[in-house]
Image (cartoon, grey):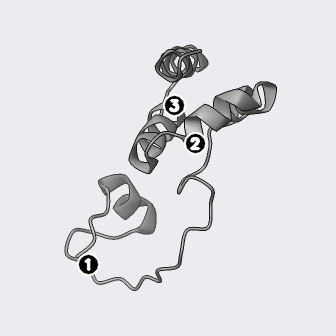
Amino acid sequence: MIMVSKARLDALGLRVGSMAQMQLRPDLSRYGMPVPPSLAEVFEFDPDVETAFQRLLPGRQRNHLHQIGQAKSEETAAKRIAALLRELGF
């Protein structure tokens, strides 16, 4: 059983209990999910930040990527990036 969000079900035109086919394939991305553009800019500006980020456990990395990527405004994303930088010691 795989859980799917209501938003994803709606986007696919499915309902709870619907039958669907899916294909699983390995995730070949560096962190298991996309790096938000605002954080990618920080990594590009200061590679030491990305090096420190890579020392985090994979689950912590994905949590930060998710939290920053889900920010509804640039201001919120900036606050979350600032919190990450403090956590990393910058």
Quarter of the picture containing the N terminus is bottom left
* Dot 1: element: loop
2 left or right of 71 in image: left
**Sequence-wise first label, 3 or 1:** 1
**Label 1 is placed on what type of residue?**
Ser
* Vertical side of 21 occupied by 74: above or below: above
Tell how many labels.
3
* Vertical side of 83 occupied by 20: above or below: below
- The residue beneath circle 3 is 68
* Vertical side of 82 occupied by 24: above or below: below
42 left or right of 3 in image: right
Residue sitting nearer the eye, 10 or 66? 66
* Dot 2: element: helix
Q: Position of residue 33 (x, y in %)?
A: 54, 53
Instruction: Tell me, yes or no, whether the two marked residues, 1 and 2, touch with CB atoms within 8 Å.
Output: no
- The residue beneath circle 1 is 18
Q: Can residue 39 be seen at all in this image of the molecule?
A: no
Q: CA distance from mark 3 to mark 1?
A: 32 Å
Q: Residue at x 75, y 32 (%)?
A: 47
Q: Residue at x 61, y 67 (%)?
A: 28
Few, some or many C-alpha atoms within 10 Å of disc 2 (few <14, some 14-19, many ≥20)? some
**Label 3 is placed on what type of residue?**
Ile
Q: Position of residue 62 (x, y in %)?
A: 46, 45
- The residue beneath circle 2 is 54
Nearest to the eye among marks 3 and 2: give it: 2
29 left or right of 83 in image: right
Few, some or many C-alpha atoms within 10 Å of disc 3 (few <14, some 14-19, many ≥20)? many
Checking the image for residue 72, the label placed there is: none
Q: CA distance from mark 1 to mark 2?
A: 39 Å
Nearest to the eye among marks 3 and 1: give it: 3
Q: Residue at x 65, y 37 (%)?
A: 51
**Label 2 is placed on what type of residue?**
Gln
